[in-house]
Amino acid sequence: MTVIDTFPAYTIVASGNTFEEGEDFAIGRDTARYGRLYDFFRLGSVEGLAARYNKDPDEQIARAIEFGHELYWANKCATIVSDRPQNHRTVRAINLGDTITFKGKTFRVEPAANNTVTLVEVA
């Protein structure tokens, strides 16, 4: 594990591209005023949500496909300034265009609207 950047609330590291349900990753971006900042994303899936809410995964996957929903995604996480102490977190960094493994599948992380990302399955 290689440390890329350290802040009071979190440390950004380079450490493999295999992720689990609900795990976060960071994508860095350079700003003119503040230097390098990071956007955080949390991975999710229909299968993971079905398990969380005690639903039948196969039924929920079929329903998602029927409605044209994505089966895998990365949600952008909000960042806030707070006066409440938080545990120091370690978050893995990736770059746009990198491939990740999630739920046994390989995805390329591509930019999407509103500074978000989309997961594009790679064969």
Image: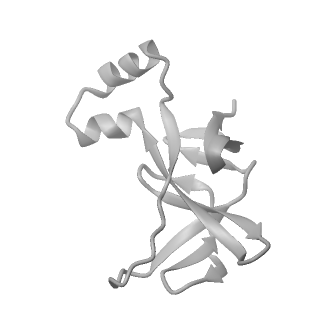
- The residue positioned farthest toward the left in the image shown: 54
Please say if 93 is above or below 10. above
Count the marks: how many? 0
Q: Is residue 110 left or right of residue 19?
A: right
Image coordinates of residue 34 in percent, x first then y, are 71, 78
Which residue does the image show at 31% across and 28% down from the upper left? 57
- The residue positioned farthest toward the right in the image shown: 32
Which residue does the image show at 66% across and 71% down from the upper left? 37
Q: Which residue is at the front of the view, 23 or 104? A: 23
Please say if 33 is above or below 51. below
Residue 53, image quadrant: top left
Which residue does the image show at 45% across and 70% down from the upper left? 80
Image coordinates of residue 108 in percent, x first then y, are 69, 42
Q: Which residue is at the front of the view, 38 or 94? A: 38
Please say if 39 is above or below 59. below
- Quadrant where the N terminus sits is bottom right
Please say if 35 is above or below 56. below
Q: Which residue is at the front of the view, 21 or 114? A: 114
Which residue does the image show at 65% across and 35% down from the upper left? 120
Q: Is residue 122 left or right of residue 45?
A: right
- Quadrant where the C terminus sits is top right
Image coordinates of residue 56 in percent, x first then y, are 25, 26
Image coordinates of residue 99 in percent, x first then y, are 69, 47
Q: Is residue 88 left or right of residue 28?
A: left
- The residue positioned farthest toward the front in the image shown: 33
Q: What is the image's colouring?
A: one colour
